[in-house]
Amino acid sequence: MKRLGFIKNTSRIMLVLVFVAAAAAIIVVNSVRDTQPERERTAFYNDIVLRSTPVLDQQDSPLCWIDAMLATIETDRLQLGDSVTLSPDYLARRFMEEQSLPCFFACLPKEKGKKAADDDVINMRGTAMTALRLATRYGVLPFDSYFPEKSVDWTSLARKATALARSSSSLTQFKESLGNALDRQAGYLPTAVHMLGATYTPLEFAHSLFLPGDYVALSSCTHHPFYSRFALEYPDNHYNDSCLNVPLDRMMSLIDRALEQGHAVCWEGCINNDGFDWKHCQADVSVNERDKMGSGRRLQDYRQRLIERRKVTDDHAMCIVGRAHTQDGRRWYLAKNSWGKTNGLKGYMYLSKEYLELYTVVIVLHR
């Protein structure tokens, strides 16, 4: 800008003035953005922080339920001195393969104009219990053993798989076409896991990390008896997996006990509300709502009303790896997300105790 006084040519002067005006406009825009009201920063004091593996980015694929459950297993192994990162794409592939058979037969024969049923479409949404079921049945693979060169758009691939089911004239043809599509986009499946001089099948490798029955799923509602098992009434629970129904205060105490004993907690719940703020790294309920919640039976009934009004939806899953408090004495929980390092805490956020009490659908933790 110092050269402006030495420019003789009028056209050059006008050109510089245009750039000056544009720069001024940018400064004004940035100034407005910088002065927009920001949520007051909350100071968190960590009481428990468990070791965890790198934050993943699920991108556009609805695989948070796999990421969160595997992250829980990974943290549990880290606490034992065993560092392992597991492949979410392996379980996603097995999940798609499982759905392919009912999808194929649901598509044949099909009347013209008939509306597609649930079995007609391969759907990649699931629950933490689904991920645990898949890992127990098919085993797991280390991240480095099954990691596609490019991120897989599992939603798009599910649509392609559904189209293949509808167009294939035989089951053999469909299986071959689907296998080829999965190999191209997700990579070829290894036949064995090689680690520390040992060779495992995927199932043997899973058993070296956890055994069937090591993890339990818990929820809290009053439309089923406490301390009985029931299948979650949510669309993503494809297999009608059951969880143990416990009182809310019991569920919260089990979360605390797990963290205190060095175990992560796989959390699944609702984020479709104003209190969930990824940008500012926290999820909370309003002061007004906290006043309504109360405690004990009153809190349990308040939560149940939200459930019955469909205000507690099964939207997302994360891995709880810590506990904290604020200056006012409120309790918070540190969660590892799977949206990449796109917020101020590099992929982590804090959920208030009250938020968990209202918006938890199910938790999965080590027995």
Image (spheres, rainbow, N blue to C red):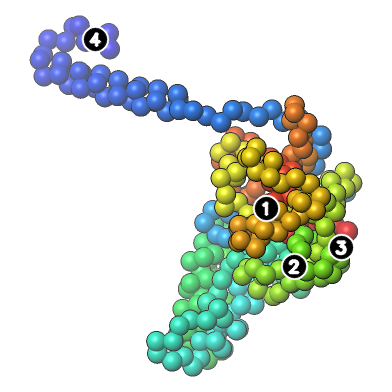
Separation of disc 1 and disc 3 at Cα?
25 Å
Find residue 59 and name its label: none
Q: Nearer the viewer, mark 1 or mark 3?
A: 1
Residue 342 appears at what percent x and percent y?
A: 56, 41
Mark 4 to mark 2: distance in Å? 77 Å
The residue wearing badge 2 is 223
Label 2 residue SS: loop
* Residues tagged 4 and 3 counted as in contact (Cβ below 8 A): no
| 296 and 199: which is toward the camera | 296
Labels 2 and 3: the sequence-earlier one: 3
Query: Tag 4's secondary structure?
Result: helix
Q: Amino acid at mark 2?
A: His
Mark 4 vs 2, N-terminal side: 4
Q: Dot 3 corresponds to which residue?
A: 214
Disc 2 from disc 1: Cα separation: 16 Å
For mark 3, does the 10 Å Cα neighbourhood hold few (<14), some (14 to 19), or many (20 or more) residues? Answer: few
Mark 1 or mark 2, which is nearer the start of the sequence? 2
